[in-house]
Amino acid sequence: MRLVIMGGAGFLGSHLVEHFLAQGHKVVAIDNFKTSTPKNIAAFRKNKRFTFIEQDVTRFIKIPGAVDAVLHFASPASPIDYLHFPIPTLKVGALGTHNALGLAKHKKAVFMLASTSEVYGDPQVNPQPESYWGNVNPIGPRGVYDEAKRFAEAMTMAYHRYHGMPVRIIRIFNTYGPRMRKQDGRAVPNFITQALKNKPITVYGRGLQTRSLCYVSDLVRGIDKLLRSKINEPVNIGNPRELTILEIAETIRTLAGSKSKIVHKPLPVDDPHVRRPDITIAKSKLGWTPEVGLEEGLRRTIEYFRKG
């Protein structure tokens, strides 16, 4: 196949580039480095099957030649990033998705949207199945990301229904692993960075809010399976093991051999109280379940941060 990966220099995008190149496919990566780094794709630059285009995907996208799949993974994804870039976040969800869909339509390619568990907002249902419509504050500070992804899903399904396009929508739950930025702002890189420096580990609120952490290699496997499927509706991909933020902080502190103390700060506005995927569809229709345990995944990630 020849795949176009938008956001290809990001945390997830670069792992997808690596995965599909390893399978022998050709990959065109597009990124503007707004929240990513050239370091993530440096190892692929000499590969003859890899092409990189530095561009903002909210501008018209032109790719010469045949394309089999377009994967739209371009977007700020951490609270620090989308609160710092609120308007670009909305634009990449709207204009970027429109451009990506237009490219896929022109090339008669499969389109995949990287959506998110944030479409469920602060859920009143736990675990969250794909049928749940969510509980989102559209005008809150997190709304720029939540609603950008919800709009992107709506546009993707409109192209599927109106143009008959094959589409794939993956709702990604908290994913972690190597190539996350130290200043990413999400719990795992924050905790690891603080723990390795023996600085206080910052937990917001009482730390009783929950998250479900999926290691990046498991997510990439799920993305590959979904891309090759015939499922046009959204599918949750994530690890259903639910942990409190405090449990995650304590586990990282232990694995890092850190002397850090845990300190508590006020809970951010609209921070979800629970987050856990219902992966019934992924299990039954894709034959996918996560394989990497939390401790093993965190050890690999901590080692990456030690070297970085």
Image: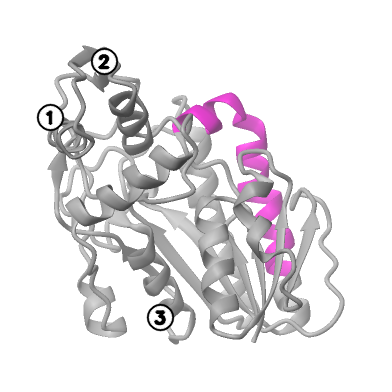
Image spot of residue 37 (x, y percent): 64, 44
Amino acid beneath label 1: Leu
- Tell me if residue 138 comes above or below residue 120 in the rendering: above
Q: CA distance from mark 2 to mark 3?
A: 40 Å
Locate the N terminus and report the quarter of the image it occupies: bottom right
Image spot of residue 35 (x, y percent): 61, 39
> Most prominent secondary structure in the magenta stretch?
helix
SS at circle 3:
helix
- Tell me if residue 25 comes above or below residue 50 in the rendering: below
Q: Tell me the number on the disc at residue 225.
A: 3
> Mark 2 or mark 1, which is nearer the start of the sequence?
2
> Mark 1 or mark 3, which is nearer the start of the sequence?
1
Foreground of the two, 196 or 271: 196
The residue indicated by pointer 1 is 208
The magenta stretch is 79-102
In the displayed structure image, the side of residue 245 where residue 115 appears, left or right: right
The colour style of the image is: one colour
> Mark 3 or mark 2, which is nearer the start of the sequence?
2
In the displayed structure image, the side of residue 80 where residue 43 appears, left or right: right
Image spot of residue 293 (x, y percent): 18, 59
Q: Tell me the number on the disc at residue 200.
A: 2
SS at circle 1:
loop
Mark 3, Cα crowd under 10 Å, few <14 / some 14-19 / many 20+, is some
